[in-house]
Image: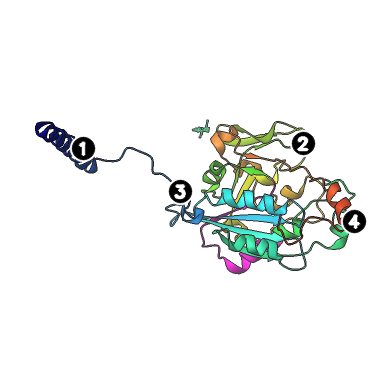
């Protein structure tokens, strides 16, 4: 009995010493595992490799016009969290409203992005009515011009930067921001799901834009979607009058800005000579809120204090 107990202790001693030795050896080795992201961690502190080291890069100024609608917060949340993955970025959000709304102010304050919050109301005569088809008049013109005005007041041509007009309903890969970062004058790339085509974009020969793949108003000087180009900050500030023309014919808004700034031959093709799609002209379906209206009539609508 006595002997048996001694054996048990002996086995216990050998096993635990081996375990301790193994653990000590492991300590000295490189961990080959992926670092676990603590789910309780604040997402703001989650610095991705993309976001790190943006100190010496040209700043990307992303200009987003936006207007109040049921799905506005969803769209801005999606875009803001894409932008979080991009280093050296400054988001200029311009509301089509008489004042800054608290919905957008709060969203920006919580975004952990560097941002500027502006507003300008589209004159009633230019505004799209609810019954109008959304292609009738160009949208967001006054708002984009307001952002240009802010840049001219607050930045100098010596600042290294690039300006990109990013509507809140498109879908952006972080790759498109890497592509546009170094833009000398105007860089261009194709945009997916636009112009009634799988994609619309510049056609490149020998590294130069020679024409455009488009099926709609092919006579446009720059048949490029708003999401398909970025402009050097220096070039914009050196042309103090360059802006979007509120009276431009439908489809000619992009050309109204680019015309005075570059020639087609000067465009810088990105995304592997315009063969890769890294941005899509997606559109969100207008939410149907018929039941909400019915319940509201009975005084039983959704809690207005709950932000959607
Ligand atoms: C684009 O095309 C030019 C000319 O054919 C070529 O020299 C260059 O390497 C191409 N760039 C890319 C990224 O494929």
User: Magenta stretch?
Assistant: 146-169
Name the outermost residue toward the left. 3
Circle 3 residues within 10 Å: few <14, some 14–19, many ≥20: few
User: Residue 161 lies in magenta, yes or no?
Assistant: yes
Task: Find residue 275 and report its horizontal and vertical position in percent.
Answer: 59, 32
Residue found 72% across the figure and 48% down from its top: 254
Q: Quadrant of the N terminus?
A: top left
Which element is circle 4 on? Answer: helix
Q: Which residue is mark 1?
A: 19
Instruction: Of the two numbered discs 1 and 2 on the same chain, state the one appearing first in sequence.
Output: 1
Point out which mark residue 269 bears: none
Q: CA distance from mark 4 to mark 3?
A: 48 Å
> Which residue corresponds to mark 3?
48
How packed mark 1 is, by other alpha carbons closer than 10 Å (few <14, some 14-19, many 20 or more), is few
Question: For numbered disc 3, what is the local secondary structure?
Answer: loop
Please tell me which of labels 4 and 3 falls first in the chain: 3
In the image, 31: left or right of 83?
A: left
């Amino acid at each position: 009995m006595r002997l048996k107990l001694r054996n048990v202790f002996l086995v216990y001693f050998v096993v635990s010493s081996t375990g301790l030795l193994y653990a000590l050896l492991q300590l000295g080795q490189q961990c080959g595992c992926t670092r676990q992201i603590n789910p309780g961690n604040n997402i703001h502190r989650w610095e991705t490799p993309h976001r790190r080291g943006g100190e010496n890069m040209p700043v990307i100024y992303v200009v987003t016009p936006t207007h109040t609608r049921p799905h506005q917060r969803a769209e801005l949340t999606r875009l803001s969290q894409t932008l979080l993955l991009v280093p050296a970025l400054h988001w200029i959000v311009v509301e089509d409203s008489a004042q800054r709304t608290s919905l957008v102010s709060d969203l920006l304050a919580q975004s952990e992005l560097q941002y500027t919050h502006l507003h300008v109301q589209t004159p009633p005569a230019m505004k799209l009515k609810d019954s109008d088809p959304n292609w009738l008049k160009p949208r967001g013109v006054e708002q984009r011009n307001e952002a240009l005005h802010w840049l001219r007041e607050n930045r100098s041509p010596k600042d290294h930067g690039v300006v990109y007009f990013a509507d809140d309903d498109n879908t952006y890969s972080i790759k498109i921001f890497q592509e546009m970062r170094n833009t000398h004058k105007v860089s261009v790339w194709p945009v997916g799901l636009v112009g009634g085509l799988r994609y619309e974009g510049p056609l490149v020969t020998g590294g130069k834009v020679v024409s455009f793949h488009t099926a709609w108003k092919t006579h446009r000087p720059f048949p490029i979607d708003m999401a398909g180009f970025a402009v050097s900050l220096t070039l914009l500030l050196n042309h103090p009058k360059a802006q979007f023309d509120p009276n431009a014919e439908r489809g000619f808004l992009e050309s109204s800005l680019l015309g005075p700034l570059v020639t087609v031959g000067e465009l810088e093709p990105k995304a592997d000579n315009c063969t890769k799609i890294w941005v899509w002209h997606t559109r969100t379906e207008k939410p149907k809120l018929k039941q909400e209206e019915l319940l509201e009539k009975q005084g039983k609508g959704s809690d207005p204090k709950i932000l959607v």
